[in-house]
Amino acid sequence: MRHPHDVDLPLVVNRGAGISLVVQVADGVRRAIETGALRGGDVLPSTRTLAERVGVSRGTVVAAFDQLHGEGWLVADQGATRVDPGLADHPVPGRATRPTSTSSAGSGRRVGASVADLRPGQPDVSGIVDPTWRAAWREAAAGAGTQHPPQGSAALRAALAEHVRVARGTAVDPDAVVVTAGVREGLQLVLTTLSRRAGRPLRVVVEDPGYPALRRVVAALGHEVRPVPVDGDGLSVEILDDEPGADVVLVTPGHQYPLGGAMPVARRLALLAWAREHDVVVVEDDYDGELRFTGEPVPALAALDRRGGGAGVVVTLGSFAKVLAPGIGVGHALVPDGLRPDVLALRGDLGSPVPATVQDALAHYLDAGALRRRTGRMRRRYRARRDLAATALADLPTARLRPMDGGLHGVVELVGADRAREREVVDAAHRTGVLVAGMGDYWADPDPDLVDPGDALPRHGLVLGLGSPDLERGLRRLRPILADPGAPGTTEGLP
């Protein structure tokens, strides 16, 4: 193993580049690993030493190292920071042994170390691995061999109940909490329970536009998917009156996906009254309700449901994929009394997919108050990223960034565009080394001819993730594409 002074780490920053120094330092370390200048197991200089060499503050280097820790490039080991030793056994994209640029089959786009991935669903994972995180996993590992009931660890359910009370304004008993492997697994559990009760496939109303992955879960389980159009305030009960025989309504009231609006209280109350009248279960996907930039987070729909008395009609699904990281693989379902015995019976048959050690680690983390502190940091960080995107894409005649009150994605509307124009822009961005999602993918039917001319919602545009470490670089490349989508894209000469 080489010592710190044996590692040549030539980092250069450019204060006039328009890119934050943190991003430049992190990019420099990544390039050193990708080219082989740094190898798995190598010890990096201390943050203080590296800051002095590069001519930046120690805080800049600490923040860059935190980002690289979260991405898996670096690990902490016996008081030193090393390149993850596991990288010695795996090829690293960008190494000289691989061609410097290739095309993915059939796409015509170039991929490699210079790609800026701005597709949604990628949270900022920097700073997760701190002393509290490590301590939580050490404590959990010390209890290896522990088994928990299928509903989930009693300690974790108590911690989750306290979390949703404080963060989401929803008072629930820990017995109402079921530990899941995330929102999709929780949705499978609820739909399968309801289908067993009914003895038939379900008729499931979903928002249009909406989250395609959840629509696919509904279809994959053999249920009927019924897309219902939303407006700027989300789902309207008046439209639901045209859906007789619905069994389930799947909604994102806290932050409609992907348009971003929050459902007003009057509409929430109307939805709950409609669901009770028609014996419909409302499944609330509370996917990033805590990450609101303006004011306090809007209480979960379940909070109103529980205050209204009665048996309850709302099942709330949540996870930690956005605030922590997708790889955590832990979520929760808040299940009303009338449905809970059947949900727990099915969970007992299937068992829990969440390992006991993971449940214990998360319980320790929540009990230490670390999640609350991280959520506050992430709100501030995503607000700054939203402002960065708004500035970078301002004053474009053919594109505009929709206002965002929270979350880790944004929608860029392509003014006057059709589906073909959207594809042109997405493909041009990909050729330029920027991966983005097309807005049309979120509609059940993106055909613009089916849209009411008075509809103010964007049918065509881009959905951008704000959590990517490549955000600044990607926005810089994306702006000329949006200004002139017919311009040929290229990765040559791009920073």
Image (spheres, rainbow, N blue to C red):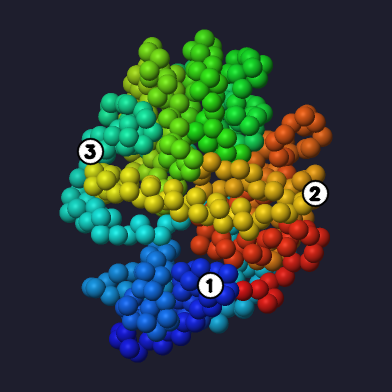
Nearer to me, 214 or 401: 401
Of all residues, the one furthest to the left in this rendering is 142
- Classify 476 as above or below 256: below
Q: Residues within 10 Å of mark 1 (few under 14, many from 20)?
A: some
- Can you give x and y, in whole percent of width and height, for residue 159 in the image? 27, 38
Residue in the picture at 71% in, 65% down: 431
Which residue in the protein does label 3 denote? 155
- Classify 329 as above or below 21: above
Q: Residues within 10 Å of mark 2 (few under 14, many from 20)?
A: few
Of all residues, the one furthest to the bottom in this rendering is 6
Label 2: which secondary element = helix
Label 1: which secondary element = loop
**What type is the residue that disc 2 sits on?**
Ala
Of all residues, the one furthest to the top in this rendering is 277
Comparing labels 3 and 1, the label whose residue is closer to the camera: 3
- Can you give x and y, in whole percent of width and height, for residue 453 in the image? 80, 31
Q: CA distance from mark 1 to mark 2?
A: 32 Å
Residue in the picture at 48% in, 71% down: 21
- Can you give x and y, in whole percent of width and height, for residue 127 in the image? 37, 59
Q: Is residue 357 visible?
A: no
Q: CA distance from mark 3 to mark 1?
A: 41 Å
- Can you give x and y, in whole percent of width and height, for residue 484 in the image? 79, 60
Give the mark nearest the N terminus, 1 or 2.
Answer: 1
Which residue in the protein does label 2 denote? 420
Which residue in the protein does label 1 denote? 93
Residue in the picture at 62% in, 78% down: 100
Q: Residues within 10 Å of mark 3 (few under 14, many from 20)?
A: some
**What type is the residue that disc 1 sits on?**
Pro
